[in-house]
Amino acid sequence: MKKRPYFVFVLLLVGVVFAQCTQSPMATKVPTTTELRAPAYPLITIDPYTSAWSMTDNLYDEPVKHWTGEQHPLIGAVRVDGQVYRFLGEVDVPWTPIVPMANFDFWNAQYTENEPAKGWEKGDFNDGSWKTGKGAFGTPEMPSLGTVWTSKDIWVRREFSIPDNLSEEDIYLIYSHDDIFELYLNGTQLVKTAYEWHNNVVLKIDASWLKPGEKNVIATHCHNRTGGGYVDFGLYQQSPEGDVFTQTAKQTKVSLSATQTHYEFTCGPVDLKLQFVSPLLPDDLDLLSRPVNYINYQVVSNDGAEHEVQVYIEATPEWAVNVPAQEVEVTQGQAGAVNFVKAGTTEQPVLEKKGDNIRIDWGYVYLAANQSENTSLSINEYFSSKQEFEQAGKVTGVESMTTRPVKEMPAMAFVDNLGTVSSKEASGYVMLAYDDLESIQYFGDNLKGWWTKEGTVTINDALQAASADYGQVMNRSAEFDNQLWDETVQAGGENYADLCVLAFRQSIAAHKLVKDTQGNILFLSKENFSNGSIGTVDVTYPSAPLYLKYNPDLLKGMLNPIFYYTESGQWTKPFAAHDVGTYPLANGQTYGGDMPVEESGNMVILTAAIAEMEGNADYAAEHWEALTTWANYLLENGLDPDNQLCTDDFAGHFAHNVNLSVKAIMGIASYGRLAKMLGKDEVAEKYTSEAKRMAQEWMKMADDGDHYRLTFDKPGTWSQKYNLVWDKLMKLDIFPAEVAQTEIAYYLTKQNKYGLPLDNRRTYTKSDWIVWTATLADDQETFQKFIDPLHAFVTETPDRVPMSDWYETPSAEQVGFQARSVVGGYFIKLLEK
């Protein structure tokens, strides 16, 4: 796989560009990039709400999407001598409703939550005894809700008619569902799903199935197994307005570094380079939390001739809504020498929503650029903006616009007239930012982002700082990218480095950085496409290696909410809590079950790991009472855990979990290590001795000949013992070295094409645990035997979503989860040194 330096240049500023501010220093550092086919490419990665990805090989093949799969559109095009080449995103051709969904208008239907008689799906079925309600139907947190549905099942029948003169253009069924769903049109089944949930699925249908001038019926049944439930559907045709920006550039390269995604294109007689930069530098928390990303571009002639070039980059208000049916206001503004357009909902329901498949609908998205006679920012109607750019290379517009995107989509457009471009490169950049006003509700207090410094720094300040610091930020980002690349290659080889590069932004952007009212750091994770929990301990645990390596203060920010929850008296159980709420509301645990051994072990182990990295146990001393309570719980209950969940809770409850027992033993040993560092020698001796005694018992109880079991009571079983890794990394010396090596040798006989299964029960696995298990290997060659199949999963999986950590090892198909922070666990190999 070819790796090469990639030069990044800054905008060469002339004349009045910085008439009101100091010119940024030029970027001179060179980031090293790696070429790989990612399942999805990070573009804008700020936090769990502002997180946009390209989920195709070519940047222009599909619209840019939020990590949840909803559109967060970015459009980019270059006009060369009057010819337009689209290089970014896809033009969203509007849908004309025939039978609208609820995001366009509520609709009437008959429904029942009791199983109906046979034939309920047919057009002539008598549904007179059913209830009448408005769609969409769903649980209370769902969008565009007309009727609340909280039972397990719902059957819906929607009657409609279509005109005799309906256009013969293609007709599409669009539907959303959560969970198991079936749909019939006039008695013909069109949709039948498994346990899954999707929004706005588009299905072309045969127009002959419709009856012009007569009664038509769409009938659906949805079974909600767990969590949210939802039913919405409609029929649409595509508008003919979409005939703009139809010609695409030719993408010639895509590559990645830790903080940047790089693209190269041929646009007729010019070449274009493009970089999306998220300066998430772990040693600079003000910069890491600043909600501003950069889009850089460089254009050069490829035929030796001169060409007139204009660059167009566009965002839409969809970045600032949960659903496009919400009313938005788009306005223009200025921050010093930075111009911007911004958009947000008129409602501004600050911190009113919580959940998993939710996007932010408060605060404002910004598209911003430095003032210049050659650049402009405008607000216009979606197609008018593009048509004017095609015709004239510029965009005019209005001062403001208030509308619903689902009915009239505004375009927030940036244009840079680069003028005559020759063999000398012309360049520029634009900034995309998000001001969320209030970020997190923490035990009743609304907290602003870290970058605001308790509200003393405004988004206008942040935009001006991002502009003034541009060259310095590019240099520092490149330096960090090169450091990370060199360290990961040295630790585990290029395939391992690829995984870490792709994991870096994903892991950090699944968190929000804030301070509590006492000034303590809080780095709160969101369980993306898992259940939406905030500050989950068994998500912190696998994520931790990235933060242990690059800034343990961030890991403290992940542990602090759980310590506070216990120490404040709000959590009174003798083991650690699972979470502190549902994102973004951190007011106490909302998960339905406890994980006593799992979470207690996690908290003690990670506190000890922080002490190892910092060379002192000061942080542990601050929380000694809580740590003691949890260590004692592990001592009493950890060797042979009773029926309970562990971090792999998707596998269900089970007792006598051998790997969970390892975690308990590691937790007890970690407490002993902390006591030793704090000069509590008698305590240290007691817990360390107990851990060693338990390890010997564990070996007898778990022994299965050439490996160790999944559960103590079931011979002929096996599982990954990834929790053993701390014995090696912290040199605790609790288990004999041959235990891990016996396991490693056995695992090599159980691998499938795309990796090592989690255990003997199923063929699925967790990618983070594979890397932990691989780190138990004593040599690089064996480590590589586990990493190479995982690398193949990442580069060959058919599921184009931000990297999943839960997948099938024979097929590389996603089972669940995506865009989660746990991929920070890939960095565990770096902790060996």
Image (cartoon, rainbow, N blue to C red):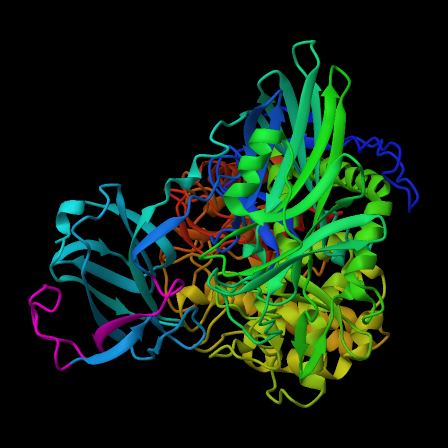
Q: Depth check: 383 or 562 in front?
A: 383
548 in the magenta segment:
no
Q: Depth check: 473 or 777 in front?
A: 473
Q: Is residue 354 visible?
A: yes
Q: Is residue 510 above or below residue 388?
A: below
Could you tell me which quadrant the N terminus lies in?
A: top right
> Residue 248 appears at what percent x and percent y?
51, 28
Q: Is residue 697 above or below residue 800?
A: below
> Residue 258 appears at what percent x and percent y?
69, 42
124 in the magenta segment:
yes
The prevailing secondary structure element of the residues shown in magenta is loop
> Residue 243 appears at what percent x and percent y?
43, 35
Q: Quadrant of residue 25?
A: top right
Q: Is residue 330 above or below residue 155?
A: above
Q: Could you tell whether 590 is left or right of 299 in the image?
A: left
The residue stretch that appears in magenta: 101-129
Q: Looking at the image, which residue is at 82% across and 46% down?
A: 467
Q: Is residue 151 above or below residue 173?
A: below
> Residue 443 appears at what percent x and percent y?
67, 83
Q: Looking at the image, which residue is at 68% across and 78% down?
A: 442
Q: Is residue 728 visible?
A: no
Q: Quadrant of residue 521?
A: bottom right
Q: Looking at the image, which residue is at 49% across and 74% down?
A: 640
Q: Depth check: 371 or 57 in front?
A: 371
